[in-house]
Image: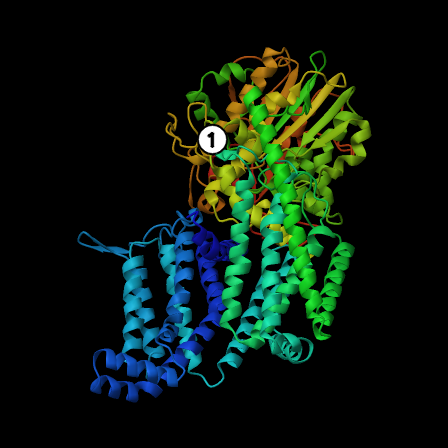
């Protein structure tokens, strides 16, 4: 599918489908509803095209009806060449040519690219695989609802055909037999093509047919547009209420989404404003086909150049060696060429199709709109470029937590855009179109010139890359030392593995007995419970102890949750640098720092002077890891991401500041390729563990060292190549464990084995016995683990989610893994770390003891799912359902030890 036709015609449509699918999936957290959203969006977007197509089809029907009597008479009287000549004369007299009969097929022709795009996108979409919806067990496969003998019956294609037939009956009422045959024949053709297709694709096309049926019903109404407007307003109102009432998004993003949808309300005003612009401001465009076509062509070409050539070439020219040799591609100019063809598909092919389908009034608006977009694109990209720090090869910013801009910058940006639009409008109104054309033409020439300069830099960079590769066999740079251990003093190492599951510890040691040596001296606290099933509530106790459990944080109801979370994250680094003697402190990727998805490490800035260092590592080394493992890793994942995302990066750069977070989408750019995403997400954390040895030296700037590595490897599931459990392009060995075919076991094994390699490195360098180590997780994952005494209550509690990893090795400890049945919580981790470091360790922020005395009455667990800060209904307390609190003590595997404790 790398052909020019696909990139120019089909690719733009697949990106629209991906965008809508990912947006709806993120909004509703339901794959089936996301498919419905795609169908609705595509139907609405194509409605203007179908209206135009219907107009031309009706024109053709009227002409055929008008000429039918005379044509039939000529055909009955004359034969052969004489008939042809007389018919040609008659057609010429009526200003008609037989090729115009193709207008009757406009409706079918429009469906072809959209069907091809949907088929390309949805038939192989990994996000559909294994996902159920209503009666559909797997949307990535045929629905196969039941069988008759050896024949599998797929219900969705049959339902699709029935809906298509009903729609066709309504649509072709009063039309010719030819139209009826075409409509019903098309319906039968689709059932043949789609019968064994994935249910998600068939559901999409079924809903398209349903929307088509509704459209045909609307055509029969007296005022279809007015009825559609009222229905749309009602649906938008319900959607906005649901968006805020359900706390689906953060308030800021909910406001932005609501604003976009609320633009439906003043739709009648848009029509009046458009007519005013056409008849007053843009009258010179309306009255001159040459003027508006020239403006359209220059703007469309200009947008293609800036989005497809200029920004991609600037990006790669900034570091051509970094983009060279990716996945077997030599010169990185291949990515520039690819993005230009994609951009041309958007702005030249599809914009031209829409432009020339309409008449002068709509053409006037399209030409002016493209001119505004071209000017704004240049303004946004080069006057408001934004300072986002380092950009990785996978086009993710690694130095910042988000791409949000200040309110002042947004207002200034929008003001400048409005001034630019007003200037272009004034030039058109006062008949200065010639100068507008000159300006746009010169800008296009300038873009081409700058692109040629960038191409020269890229070629030179690639030549340098080849020289280095041939001379040294590698272009990899040294990894920065982050973790500084002391060989003579004490080291306290705290390894936090997000969602690491305790149930896999003993099976992994059974499969890898050598871990008893590499991880000698460890005690595994099997009977450990966490305070929630998500990181937001489950992680603060890991960092600050029992003062930061959901119960304790709610007791401090006058303080903001974000401040209490930050305080928890700062507890141990502050303790070791303020109360302990001769310690420095290092922390990476502090979970939910400042309630930011990408941690805001600035919360540690004020402690730098006392020896606290904070780093972001998650995702920073992913592209480096790919380059270092091209022999075993998935070899085309980086190039596949770049081929898609460079265009999206260009959209990000040319968009106004207020829209950039939407285009960036946390670095995912609305991709639906979950196979790539799963691989990337896992490697974002795994690469850090794999490079841990390279990050380590034994030159601590202080006598003692505290190091807190926070890592997400165990949160993302991926099958790995056993027995070492490393990422491979194709896994052939799944290991010998009873959990060998469970992705989360593989993820856990990969993380733990790399941790073991790191600790073995410490041992080889004489820096193990003087190191105290805690491994902990914020929560578990599997709802139903073996070993629990299950009853009906436990089915609702899903206790496996609250069973986290907790392992401890003290200074000088040796021996094989010891398993303890003592009742523990992950809030015990801080007290294990600080025990004996000072005589009476206390929380630097509150002055209260850092110990585990608070668990004498058990642990109060919050079962409510609060995954993101905006899912919570308060800034000060966790708004969990009052019946979703359970106190547990003793043996956590015994359901009788979980007691519901209603909270007010």
Q: Which residue is outermost to the right?
A: 609
Residue 411 visible (yes or no): yes
- Pick the residue in front: 347 or 703: 347
Badge 1: how crowded within 10 Å, few (<14), some, or many (20+)? some
Is 780 on the left or on the right of 386, as rendered?
left
Of all residues, the one furthest to the left in this rendering is 149
What residue would you read off at disc 1? 633
**563 relative to 334 in the view: left or right:** right
The way the protein has been coloured in the rendering is rainbow
Horizontal side, residue 798 vs residue 652: left or right: left
Q: At which x and y percent is residue 552?
A: 68, 42
Front residue of 123 and 1 = 1
Q: Position of residue 209 (x, y in %)?
A: 38, 68
At x 63% / y 74%, what residue is drawn?
285
Q: Tell which of 180 and 362 is nearer to you.
A: 362
User: At x 43% / y 77%, what residue is drawn?
Assistant: 56
User: Image height check: is 171 above or below 753?
Assistant: below
The answer to whether residue 91 is above or below residue 508 is below
Q: Report x, y in % for residue 537.
A: 62, 43
Q: Quadrant of residue 181?
A: bottom left
Tally of numbered tags: 1
Residue 273 drawn above or below residue 293: below
Tell me which corner region of the image, top left, top right, bottom left or bottom right, holds residue 293. bottom right
- Position of residue 152 in the picture relative to residue 38 (left or right): left
Could you tell me which secondary element the residue under label 1 belongs to?
A: loop
Residue 570, given in percent of the width and then of the height, sits at 73, 34
The answer to whether residue 620 of the structure is visible from this angle is: no
């Amino acid at each position: 599918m790398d052909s020019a036709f696909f990139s120019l015609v089909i690719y733009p449509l697949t990106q629209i489908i991906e965008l809508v699918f990912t947006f709806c999936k993120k909004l509703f957290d339901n794959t089936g509803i996301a498919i419905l959203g795609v169908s609705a969006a595509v139907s609405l977007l194509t409605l203007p095209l179908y209206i135009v197509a219907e107009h031309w089809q009706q024109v053709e029907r009227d002409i055929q009806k008008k000429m039918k009597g005379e044509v039939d008479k000529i055909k009955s009287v004359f034969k052969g060449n004489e008939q042809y000549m007389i018919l040609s004369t008659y057609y010429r007299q009526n200003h008609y040519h037989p090729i115009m009969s193709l207008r009757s097929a406009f409706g079918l022709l429009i469906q072809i690219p959209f069907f091809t795009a949907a088929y390309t996108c949805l038939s192989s979409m990994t996000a559909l695989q294994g996902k159920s919806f209503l009666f559909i067990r797997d949307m990535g496969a045929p629905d196969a609802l039941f069988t008759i003998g050896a024949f599998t019956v797929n219900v969705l294609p049959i339902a699709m055909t029935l809906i298509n037939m009903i729609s066709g009956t309504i649509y072709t009422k009063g039309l010719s037999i030819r139209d009826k045959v075409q409509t019903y024949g098309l319906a039968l053709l689709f059932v043949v093509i789609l019968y064994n297709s994935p249910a998600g694709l068939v559901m999409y096309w079924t809903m398209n047919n349903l929307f088509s049926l509704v459209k045909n019903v609307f055509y029969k109404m007296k005022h279809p547009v007015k009825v559609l407007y009222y229905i749309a307003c009602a649906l938008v109102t319900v959607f906005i209420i649901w968006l805020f009432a359900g706390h689906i998004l953060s308030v800021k993003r909910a406001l932005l989404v609501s604003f976009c949808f609320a633009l439906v309300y003043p739709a009648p005003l848009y029509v009046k404003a458009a007519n005013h612009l056409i008849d007053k401001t843009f009258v010179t465009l309306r009255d001159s086909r040459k003027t508006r076509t020239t403006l359209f062509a220059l703007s469309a070409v200009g947008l293609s150049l800036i989005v497809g050539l200029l920004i991609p070439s600037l990006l790669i020219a900034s570091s051509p060696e970094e983009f060279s040799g990716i996945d077997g591609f030599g010169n990185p100019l291949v990515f520039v060429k690819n993005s230009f063809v994609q951009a041309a598909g958007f702005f030249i092919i599809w914009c031209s199709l829409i432009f020339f389908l309409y008449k002068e009034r709509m053409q006037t608006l399209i030409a002016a709109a493209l001119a505004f977009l071209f000017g704004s694109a240049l303004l946004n990209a080069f006057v408001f470029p934004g300072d986002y720090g380092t950009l990785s090869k996978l086009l993710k910013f690694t130095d910042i937590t988000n791409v949000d801009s200040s309110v002042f910058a947004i207002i200034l940006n929008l003001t400048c855009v409005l001034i630019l639009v007003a200037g272009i409008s004034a030039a058109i109104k006062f008949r200065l179109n010639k100068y507008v054309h000159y300006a746009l033409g010169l800008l296009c020439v300038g873009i081409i010139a700058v692109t040629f300069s960038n191409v020269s830099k890229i070629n030179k960079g690639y030549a340098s890359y080849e020289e280095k590769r041939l001379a040294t066999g590698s272009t990899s740079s040294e990894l920065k030392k982050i973790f500084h251990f002391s060989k003579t003093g004490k080291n306290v190492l705290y390894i936090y593995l997000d969602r690491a599951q305790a149930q896999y510890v003993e099976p992994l040691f059974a499969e890898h007995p050598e871990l008893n040596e590499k991880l000698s001296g460890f005690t595994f606290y099997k009977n450990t419970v966490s305070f929630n099933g998500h990181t937001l509530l489950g992680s603060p106790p890991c960092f600050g102890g029992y003062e930061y459990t959901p119960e304790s944080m709610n007791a401090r109801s006058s303080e903001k949750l974000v401040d209490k979370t930050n305080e928890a994250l700062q507890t141990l680094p502050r303790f070791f640098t303020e109360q302990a003697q001769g310690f420095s402190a290092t922390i990476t990727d502090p979970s939910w720092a400042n309630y930011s998805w990408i941690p805001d490490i600035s919360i540690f800035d004020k402690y730098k002077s006392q020896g606290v260092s904070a780093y972001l590592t998650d995702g920073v080394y992913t592209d480096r890891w790919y380059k270092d493992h091209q022999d075993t890793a998935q070899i085309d994942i980086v190039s596949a991401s770049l081929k898609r995302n460079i265009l999206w990066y260009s959209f990000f750069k040319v968009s106004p500041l207020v829209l950039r977070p939407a285009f960036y989408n946390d670095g995912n750019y609305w991709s639906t390729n979950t196979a790539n995403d799963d691989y990337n997400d896992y490697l974002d954390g795994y690469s850090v563990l794999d490079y841990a040895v390279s990050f380590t030296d034994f030159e601590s700037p202080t006598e003692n060292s505290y190091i807190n590595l926070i890592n997400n490897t165990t949160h993302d599931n991926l099958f790995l190549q056993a027995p070492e459990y490393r990422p491979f392009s194709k896994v052939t060995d799944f290991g010998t464990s009873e959990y060998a075919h469970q992705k989360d076991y593989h993820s856990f094994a990969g993380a733990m084995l790399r941790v073991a390699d790191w600790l073995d490195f410490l041992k080889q360098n004489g820096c193990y016995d003087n190191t105290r180590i805690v491994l902990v997780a914020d929560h578990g994952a599997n709802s139903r683990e073996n070993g629990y005494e299950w009853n009906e209550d436990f089915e609702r509690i899903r206790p496996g989610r609250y069973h986290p990893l907790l392992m401890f090795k003290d200074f000088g400890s040796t021996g094989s893994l010891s398993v303890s049945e003592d009742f523990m919580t992950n809030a015990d981790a801080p007290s294990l770390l600080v025990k004996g470091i000072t005589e009476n360790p206390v929380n630097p922020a509150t002055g209260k003891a850092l110990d585990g005395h608070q668990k004498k009455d058990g642990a109060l667990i919050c079962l409510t799912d609060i995954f993101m800060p905006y899912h919570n209904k308060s800034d000060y307390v966790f708004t969990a359902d009052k019946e979703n609190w359970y106190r547990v003590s003793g043996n956590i595997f015994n359901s009788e030890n979980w007691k519901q404790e209603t909270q007010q």
